[in-house]
Amino acid sequence: MTALKLLTAFFLTMLLCACSVFQGKPMPLPPPTQHAQLIVYAQTGTLEKMGSISVNVRGSADDADHAI
């Protein structure tokens, strides 16, 4: 029984370590320009939330995107 607990703890530890590999490292934002710029998820850590948007639409997620 003790071996099973140790093996379970080992696999959970390895799983958590593997998750941190996919998270990525924080990256600085590009300098502002006159045009829209694509940013990746790793660059969103320093951004401030401006607000939230909600929409009630029957249909698919594409319909909700179109409504926004």
Image (cartoon, rainbow, N blue to C red):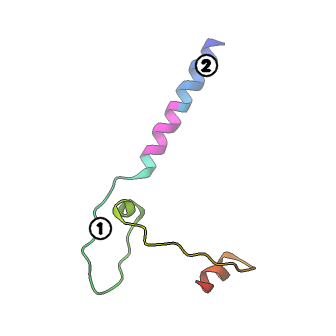
Q: Percent x, y for residue 26?
A: 33, 56
Q: Which residue is under mark 2?
A: 5
Q: Residue at position x 35%, y 78% from top? A: 37
Q: Residues within 10 Å of mark 1 (few under 14, many from 20)?
A: some
Q: Secondary structure at mark 2?
A: helix
Residue 59: which quarter of the image?
bottom right
Q: Which residues are magenta?
A: 13-20
Q: Residue at position x 43%, y 72% from top? A: 50
Sequence-wise first label, 1 or 2: 2
Q: Percent x, y for residue 47?
A: 36, 65
Q: In the visual, does 3 lie left or right of 43?
A: right
Q: In the visual, does 26 lie left or right of 4?
A: left
Q: Residues within 10 Å of mark 2 (few under 14, many from 20)?
A: few
What amino acid type is highlighted by mark number 2?
Answer: Lys
* Residue at the extreme front: 51
Residue 12: which quarter of the image?
top right
Q: Residue at position x 55%, y 75% from top? A: 53
Q: Residue at position x 47%, y 41% from top? A: 18
Identify the main secondary structure in magenta.
helix
**19 drawn magenta:** yes
Q: Nearer the viewer, residue 20 or 52?
A: 52
* Residue 29 image label: 1
The quadrant of the rendering that contains the N terminus is top right
Q: Secondary structure at mark 1?
A: loop
Q: Nearer the viewer, residue 62 or 52?
A: 52
**59 drawn magenta:** no
Alpha carbon distance from label 1 to label 2: 44 Å
What amino acid type is highlighted by mark number 1?
Answer: Leu
Q: Is residue 38 above or below residue 40?
A: below
